[in-house]
Amino acid sequence: MKRALAAVALAGLLTGSLTACVQSGRTDQSRATGDKVACPVAVDESFTGTVRLGYQDIPNGDLVVKDAGLLETCLPKAKITWSKFASGATVIQAFGSNSLDLGLLGSAAAARALSAPLNIGMKAVWVHDVIGAAESLVVKDSAITSVTGLRGKKIGVPFASTSHYSLLAALTAAGIERDVTLVNLQPDAIAAAWKGGDIDAAFIWEPTLSELVKNGHVVTTAADTAKAGKPTYDLEGARSEFVSANPKFLEVWTAAQNWAVNQINTAPDAAATRISAQLGVPVTEVRKQLGEYGYLDAATQAGPAYLGKQLGADLKSSADFLLRQGEIQALAAPDAYTAAVYPDAATKVSAK
């Protein structure tokens, strides 16, 4: 596949991604909109460590937890540092450099991290969302109405992301994976390249997606590629060493995320207000975006369809596809993808 070297080796991608963590190393606490939220489990004053959390501007429970200051309430003696990342590739880089404990990344990025040449020791501890129409392929030319119409075009996408995985799947299904140029761009750079006419299309997520469709149109979505057997998720990854050393923290963290998912599913206006404060976009727009993802509570996640069993198989499937595309050097050991899934915290939270 032709690539503006921008389509380069992963090592170069990760080295260059340092600048994409726009807040790394800086404490960015909740904006604390709305009423103070009580901890959904017993407050834990025994944990006194520092936890470095990575988040992204994606409308899900992570932003609800952050805005409510829930971890700070549940763990009053902990030092919680929130750092904003632009994509899963930058989260992988931070895991590799041991500068992050937990961080949000897509399932494709997680599969890449677990595979060669990176072989990063990490666990998937939570499914933030099941990605649907919130990640889509947007085209500027109104005459192009299908993926096949993109032959010879330039398409922007953040490499090592779920959008990258979905785009490759869509191009392969259309038989044009060798006939397009992929340009590796982070979300803000995609918006700029779109305005400047440097790309013809982009596969990207919210909120950038909503900006592009103002003068473009969608030809396929992550929901479509999921139906074709290539589902994608936003996950919470954690360094394996951190998971082993801090099971009690992870249980509190998971309880906070479970509370946020229940907010999204049962009180979406309140959840959207908090997410709006974090993203800086109107509440009405957030409400629309929430409908483009699926949000799973702890009981559902602990079951066989997700953390209980299937997620490991989906990560392996993602890695198989990335290997066929030449996006990774080799697969990890056969059981590495299943072993990378950590259902313990979700199981304990769902039992309470």
Image (cartoon, grey):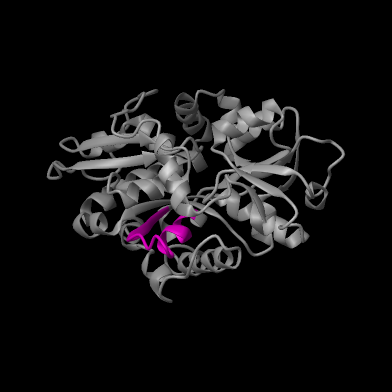
Q: Which residue, as the protein is rendered here, is positioned at the far bottom?
A: 334
Residue 68 appears in which quarter of the rendering? top left
Q: x, y percentage for residue 123?
A: 35, 59
Identify which residue, 169 or 1, lies in the foreground.
1
What quarter of the picture does the C terminus occupy?
bottom left
- Residue 79 seen in the current view: yes
Q: Is residue 124 magenta?
A: yes
Identify which residue, 17 or 36, lies in the foreground.
17
Q: Name the side, left or right, on which 224 lies relative to 271.
A: right
Q: Name the side, left or right, on which 193 lies relative to 82.
A: right
Q: How many dots with numbers?
A: 0
User: Residue at coordinates 25% horizontally, 34% vertically from top-left?
Assistant: 72
Q: x, y percentage for residue 110?
A: 45, 57
User: Residue at coordinates 83% horizontally, 48% vertically from top-left?
Assistant: 149
Identify which residue, 331 or 312, lies in the foreground.
331
Q: x, y percentage for residue 228?
A: 69, 63
Is residue 187 positioned above or below 182 on the image? above
- The stretch in magenta equals 109-126
User: Residue at coordinates 28% horizontally, 44% vertically from top-left?
Assistant: 99
Q: Name the side, left or right, on which 197 lies relative to 70.
A: right
Q: x, y percentage for residue 51?
A: 24, 42
Q: Name the side, left or right, on which 245 lies relative to 179.
A: left
Residue 257 appears in which quarter of the rendering? top left
Q: Is residue 49 magenta?
A: no
What quarter of the picture does the N terminus occupy?
bottom right
User: Residue at coordinates 32% horizontally, 41% vertically from top-left?
Assistant: 53
